[in-house]
Image (cartoon, grey):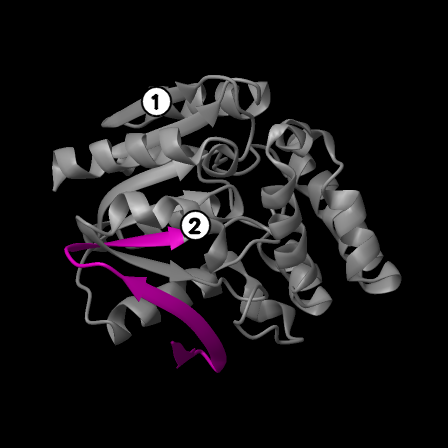
Amino acid sequence: MNIIVDGIDYYYEVSGKGEPVILLHGFTGDHSTWNPIKQYLIDSFQVIRIDIIGHGKTSSPPDVSKYRMEQVVSQINGILDHLSLKKAHMLGYSMGGRLALSYAIANPERVKSLVLESTSPGLRTEEERRLRVQADEQLSDKILRDGIEKFVDYWENIPLFKTQKNINILAREQIRQQRLANNPIGLANSLKGMGTGAQPSYWDELAALDMPVLLLCGELDSKFCRISKEMQLLIKNADLVEVNEVGHAIHVEDPKKFGTIVKEFLCKIS
């Protein structure tokens, strides 16, 4: 289904019945990222999978300001309004986790619970953000200069996704084809507008969260497990699950375990 929000043609899919759960994918993903997880949730929840701006079937406008984290939070708010949802559970992975966290900080009254997979609240210092912005701008230029195929070749071989080599070849090919279907302008602008360096740092805002929060990290992703442990200390109502034998993309590498953990958490608080 499609809806125009902030002049952007957003694509989303709704499945199942029950309390609504918004699913937000990572960078280079789209709503289909969650196909293996949907089956664990739709018997108990209304699952709403959104293609974030610049990804999948949602528009990829040339105006970078449309991709700023604050703007995208407002766009997600518009989708909830369109669906007449006063409150929803929110689940996000990596970039989508940063978006879900940003949304919960800006609109706590509309978030019943928050599930953050391999998520960072941003970078703590101005210098870290400046260096990351430079790196993301260089990467966005690479996407536009070299084209989507060369970028995907590079992206699927970065160390962060090394553990995805362990999943079956059919699943890896599906992920690759989904990435290749993205618009290079959308990916480039996503990096510039809502990359980790471009977004605000939310470390000082974590203590204000009072909804139930589930933090998920893969044990082979030591960086994000460290970040998740630091976040847990600052969030008053947070559980942390470190999933064995997987890396950054838990929902891809072990969808059964991921889906089971998330469903148990949501059912407990619904």
Residue at the spot x=53%, y=71% of the render?
Answer: 57
Residue at the spot x=67%, y=60% of the render?
Answer: 187
Residue 121 shown in magenta: no
Left or right of 247 on screen, residue 251: left
Residue at the spot x=19%, y=71% of the render?
Answer: 84
Q: Is residue 99 visible?
A: no
Q: Nearer the viewer, mark 1 or mark 2?
A: 2
Magenta residues, as a range?
1-23
Q: Which mark is residue 230?
A: none
Q: Which mark is residue 240?
A: 1
| Residue 165 percent across, percent down from the top left | 67, 31
In the structure shown, which secondary structural element does the residue marked by tag 1 occupy? strand
Q: Which quadrant is home to the C terminus? A: top left
Residue type of the residue flagged with mark 1: Leu
Q: Main secondary structure of the magenta part?
A: strand
Left or right of 199 on screen, residue 214: left
Q: Is residue 234 visible?
A: yes
Q: Which mark is residue 34?
A: 2
| Residue 249 percent across, percent down from the top left | 53, 35
Quick check: 263 above or below 192? Answer: above
Q: Nearer the viewer, residue 247 or 66?
A: 247
Pointer 1 or 2: first along the chain: 2
- Measured in 3D between alpha carbons, the distance from the residue under mark 1 to the one under mark 2, in whole angstroms, is 21 Å
Quick check: 177 above or below 84? Answer: above
Quarter of the image holding residue 63? bottom right
Q: Nearer the viewer, residue 74 or 163?
A: 163
Quarter of the image holding residue 125? top right
Quick check: 197 above or below 58? Answer: above
Residue at the spot x=80%, y=44% of the render?
Answer: 154
Left or right of 201 on screen, residue 189: right
| Residue 27 percent across, percent down from the top left | 59, 50
| Residue 21 percent across, percent down from the top left | 27, 52
